[in-house]
Amino acid sequence: MDRRAFMVAAGAAAGTAVVPATAEAAEGRPVRFTILSDIQGDLADFGHALDDLHSVNPGSAGLGIASDITPRGYDFEYAEVRATLDRHPHPREVAWAIGNHEFSVPKWRDPDTLAQETWPNGTTEDSLFRSFFRFAGRNTIYRETSFGGVPVLCLGTERYAKYHGPKLWDEVRLSDRQFTWLEQRLEFWLARRKPVMVLTHQVSPRAVVIKARDFTTRTWLKQITVPLHTS
């Protein structure tokens, strides 16, 4: 498989995973931040999670959302996520990655009528990306941000596969340009001996995945330590 232009099946996580992670930034200073995934319309639980995370880690350097921000990708669903975020305490720096649920609008004739047999029901691929860009406040799928000096690299698919092949659905495509950017940023930070967080929804080859799942917010908050130190 060519690592620069590949299509892999999307492995969406079930339930919202909360991963408080600790890394070292400049001068060995510890940095704590949190990664959540798969909100998928569970806005009450999202709000509870934000409150609980603030209580256990009020000085969090950042919040990463590893995709499936919405249940389907409608603009009003993005607006509901934003409104929930604004009503609850959260870090100033928030990083968003795109997931397969952000591309589910074409399965619906309207928000109340599932119509998969008439996919894409007039929805264009470009409109789905534009909805994400407006919400995330950027114009690229992949970008770099920082949580307290720890580089955070957001990755994501640049196509929704079903628009490009009748036998495809949630497969993922990362372009040569995105892979080159990723390689360059990793090499840049490696030379400076800095830990790097890569935020993405789909599993890439040779990745190490830690998944947490439960059905109560309190249980989600069990801490998982992710070793991000450079050797």
Image (cartoon, rainbow, N blue to C red):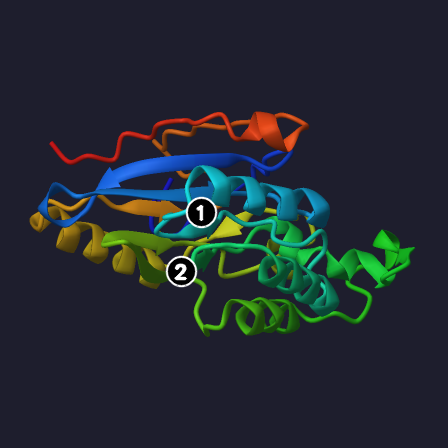
Specify the amino acid type for callout 1: Thr
Residue 198 falls left or right of residue 36: left
Q: Residues within 10 Å of mark 1 (few under 14, many from 20)?
A: many
Q: Is residue 109 above or below residue 155?
A: below
Amino acid type assigned to the residue bearing label 2 in the image: Glu
Q: Position of residue 194 (x, y in %)?
A: 15, 46
- Where is residue 168? Give x, y as percent: 64, 48
Task: Locate residue 73: give its quadrant.
Answer: bottom right
Nearer to the camera, 225 or 190: 225
Describe the element under mark 2 as helix, strand or loop: loop
Q: Is residue 143 above or below residue 138?
A: above
Location of residue 182 by image quarter: bottom left
If the image is split into quadrants, where does the C terminus sit?
Answer: top left
Element type at mark 1: loop
Residue drawn at (72%, 55%), measured in percent from left and top?
A: 72
Q: Residue at x 41, y 26 (%)?
A: 224
**Label 2 to label 1, Cα distance in Å?**
17 Å
Is there any visible trace of residue 202 in the rendered image? no
Measured along the vertical axis of the image, is residue 116 above or below residue 92? above
Q: Quadrant of the N terminus?
A: top left
Give the mark nearest the N terminus, 2 or 1: 2
Residue 200, numbered label: 1
> For the point 75% across and 60% down, which residue is it?
105
Q: In the rendered image, which residue does mark 2 sit on?
A: 93
Q: Is residue 1 left or right of residue 136?
A: left
Label 2 packing within 10 angstroms: few (<14), some (14-19), many (20+): some
Residue nearest the viewer, comparing 112 with 32: 32
Nearer the observer, 170 or 39: 39
Residue 101, percent from left and from top: 65, 51
Q: Position of residue 132 (x, y in %)?
A: 57, 66
